[in-house]
Amino acid sequence: MHHRFTLIVVAFVSCLMADSAPGENGINETHAAATEMVNSAYQADKGSGIQVAVIKGGHLAFSYAVGHADLENDVPLETTTRMRIGSVSKVFTTTLVAALVQNEIIRLDVDIREYVPEFPEKGSAITARQIASHTSGIRHYDFSNMAEANNMRFYEALSDALPVFANDPLLSDPGAEYHYSGFGINLLGIAVERVLGHPYSQALMENLLVPLGLSNTMVDHPLAIIPGRTRFYTVLNGQLVNTFWRDSSDYYPSGGLLSTAEDIANFTHAVFETDFLDEERQALFRTEATTVDLQTVGYTFGWQVMDNESGKLMYFHGGETNGAYCNVLFIPEDGLIVAGIANYNVFPPAGEVAFFDLVRRQLPELY
C-alpha cells in the first residue's frame, strides 16, 4: 500500500511538472507575462490589491491575486477573497431573472407593477425586458446627491428603498430611449423577492449561485460577519486610504454583491457557453436591444455589447463602487473570458487607471 501511494504521488507530481514545463505550448511564458501585467498594474495604480481570472476555450487558464485584503493587519489578497463588484452585480440579477423566466415564474413583457404593485403608475407599462436593457425610463442614482449616491442607511428590505426614486418622473416613455438605471435593476430585484416570497439574497443563492457552484458570491451585507471579505480602499489624491463608508443594503441587485474574479469568470462561462439557460434565454444576452423606433442601445439583457479594439464582438460589464473596480468581458470569437476586481478605486481620477487597461486590453491581447 505504501509503494502504491508513493507511485500515485510521483505520477501526480510528474503531471504537474509536465503541465508547467517551460515553453510547452507557450503556457509557462503566457502565465509569466500575465503575472507581470497584473503586478505592473497594481504598482502603477498604487492601490491595495487586484484579482484576475481568465477562461479560454471553456477552461480556467489563469487565476492570480496580488496585494492585500487588509493592509492594517497585513492580510494578503487571495484568489478566494470576496470583493465588491459594483455594477457587475447587475448581470447576476438579469441572469437570475432569465432563469426565473425560463421556469415560467416571471414574465418579461408584463407591467412590473404586477409584481411590485406599490410602484407608482407611470402612464405606460414598464417591463422587465425594458428594465434589463435600460430602456425603462427610470432614472439612475444622482451622484451630485451624496446621501443618495453614498447610502449610509441600513434597509431591512429592498422595497424600503423604493421611495428614493419611485415617485420621480420617467426620463422618457418606456422603451423610447436608453437611460442607464441602477434603480431599475433594484426594482427587478424586488420583483424577484415578490414572486419567490423570500429575500433577494436567498433567491440569488438558491436559483443561481448554488446551481452554478459560485461559493464566493453573495450580498455585501453591512452587518453580517462574512469570512474572507476584503477591506476596501480608495486612492485619494494619490494617497491610499480606507474608503468612504457605504451601506450596500439599498442596492444589492444593481451594485451590492461580493464575488471573486474566478466566480465571475465561471458565471460568465455558464451564461454564454453552457446549457444552464436554454437557447431562447441565451439569446436575451446575445441580442442587442432596441428602442420602440428600432434604435440599438448598446445593451442586451443586462450586458453591454460592443466591438473591442481589435474589432471583435465583445460582451462586457464594468463596475465601480466605494473601494472597488470590477470588469468582465467575453469575446466569443476567441472563446475568451477575462474578469478582474480591484479592492480600491481612484478619486479623483487622474489619467488612465492601470486596472482598466489590464483587464480590457492587455490580458485579452495576451490570451
Image: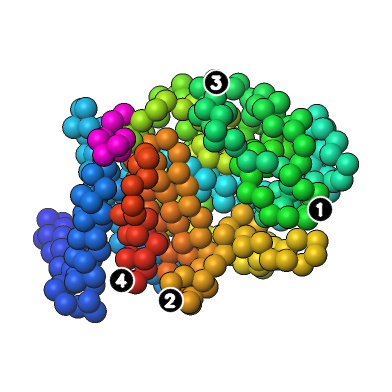
- Percent of width and height locating residue 356: 37, 55
Q: Which element carries disc 3, helix, strand or loop?
A: loop
Q: Quadrant of the C terminus?
A: bottom left
The three-letter code of the residue at mark 4 reads Leu
Q: In which quarter of the image is the N terminus?
A: bottom left
Front position in the image: 225 or 16: 225
Which residue in the structure is indicated by mark 1?
109
CA neighbours of label 1 inside 10 A, class few (<14), some (14 to 19), many (20+): few
Q: Residue furthest right?
A: 123
Pair 4/2: label in front: 2
Which residue in the structure is indicated by mark 2?
310
- Percent of width and height locating residue 348: 37, 40
The mark nearer the N terminus, 4 or 1, is 1
The three-letter code of the residue at mark 2 reads Ser
- Disc ID at residue 154: 3
CA neighbours of label 4 inside 10 A, class few (<14), some (14 to 19), many (20+): few
- In the rendered view, tell whether residue 91 sits above or below residue 57: above
The mark nearer the N terminus, 3 or 1, is 1
Residue visible at 14% across and 73% down in the picture: 22
- Percent of width and height locating residue 264: 45, 52
Residue visible at 51% across and 52% down in the picture: 212
- In the rendered view, tell whether residue 21 sits above or below residue 89: below
Q: Does the magenta stretch include residue 94?
A: no
The three-letter code of the residue at mark 3 reads Phe
What's the distance in space between the residues labelled 3 and 4, CA to CA?
43 Å
Residue 31 visible in the shown view? yes
What's the distance in space between the residues labelled 2 and 1, CA to CA?
36 Å
What's the distance in space between the residues labelled 4 and 1, CA to CA?
41 Å
> Residue 321: which quarter of the image?
top left
The three-letter code of the residue at mark 1 reads Asp
Residue segment shown in magenta: 235-242
